[in-house]
Image (cartoon, grey):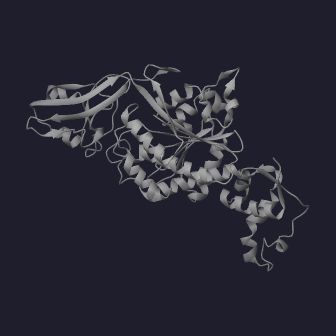
Amino acid sequence: MDKNRMYALCEEIFPINRSLTGEGVRRTLEIIKRECPGLVIKSVPSGTRSFDWTVPKEWRCDDAYIITPEGEKIADFKERNINVLGYSTPVDRDFTLEELKEHLYSLKDQPDLVPYVTSYYKERFGWAITHRQFESLKEGTYHGVIKSELFDGVLNYAELVIPGESTEEVFFTTYVCHPSMANNECSGPVVAAALIDYVRSLEKRRYTYRFVFAAETIGAITYLSQKVDPSLLADEKDGYSGGELMTNLEYLKSHVIAGFNLSCVGDNNDYSIIHSRYADTLADRVLTRVLKYHTGGSFSDYSYLKRGSDERQYQAPGVDIPLVGFCRSKYHEFPEYHTSADDMDYVSPEGFEGSFAVMSACIRALEKNHTYELTCFCEPQLGKRGLVPTISSKETFRQTLHLKDLIAYSDGRNDLLTVSEIIDASPDEVIELTDKLLETGLLKRKD
């Protein structure tokens, strides 16, 4: 999937009114399934206990607006779906200005933007408008309408597995629960879909790859609490413990070697890593190494104390999936976040392309992250194998230094990522040089 196709897919799902539950989520997942055949969409009924949480009621909103005393329609849901407070209960009545203001949300420090506001777990109603609109409201009688419904329904999530030679897994997760947020919402599923295409294109896969699309927080928690689907296992017999099906939590804990939560990956600005709790997983190592060379060292490095997405669930105590967060401009850190300014103008084909390049480089590095050792004593003769020029000069010495350094540290002690760090070369360069040495028989895998 190229950069223009990623942008077009983002553009297609951007207008959909998503929430934790409902038709918007299902419609979005069906579009992703069209792009990614084999995606399995699951339904979990309202009221289902999920660890310390309960799956909420399903929410549907058909319309919402306010009629001012002058007869003007404002906070029009059909014009902008974030004009209604997410999960609002229905209302259709008159308000004084003082009464109405208790149900209005705006941003004083961003007076021309509409905020994205929700009330998932406490029933209330409201509208979101710009602060400039808020300050312009005059005394009089207003009529507020929200045509919504809360009812027992389902929470949907989706999962896709691409088998590899091993049942050890690389795990990708992203969320589908925000309305019309291009970077904060739509970009993650789009890049995940592109990565599915990429993984499927690999001739050989060392690892199995699992992709999950779920509502943020409650979706991830519900997913972890559910039993594994045997049809989504590289080895169906591997999903049982004591004769009983494992939960997804139990299965991921015993199989995932590295995981990545994708969020805010469509803009053209920063790159960011949000580390695991102790910043000591394989996912921390590989994404840090790739970002260093992809960005020239210019990226934001956040500790787990700056978490805010589903790394909160997958890295929670007792869960401990070896996972990191990956963003371009990190959530909460860019001014357009959770506002009407997070639109299709904020993301770009190049933004998607850059995020895809980082994640695909992580996949390549994980696939090749073996420990290697030299097969001969002393420094091998590289010239006769066509690995270095037969003319020696200061220039050729510099050109071949990484190759010679790779050989020097191929002593059976260091995996590819460690060598990359020691010799200060990108993982992709180390992979290329390693492949050349393997072809000549000068290296062999120790692990």
Residue at 32% x, 22% y: name it.
Answer: 123
- In screen coordinates, is 57 left or right of 354? left
Report the number of numbered marks. Answer: 0
**Quarter of the rendering containing residue 394:** bottom right
Residue 52 shows in this picture: yes
Residue at 76% x, 50% y: name it.
Answer: 370
- In screen coordinates, is 375 left or right of 165? right
Residue at 38% x, 21% y: name it.
Answer: 152
| Figure check: 248 above or below 262 | above
- In screen coordinates, is 367 left or right of 37? right
Residue 76's x, y, as percent? 22, 39
Residue 356's x, y, as percent? 53, 53
| Figure check: 417 above or below 258 | below
The residue positioned farthest toward the bottom in the image shown: 391
- In screen coordinates, is 91 left or right of 359? left
Residue 108's x, y, as percent? 27, 40
Residue 160's x, y, as percent? 56, 40
Residue 426 shows in this picture: no
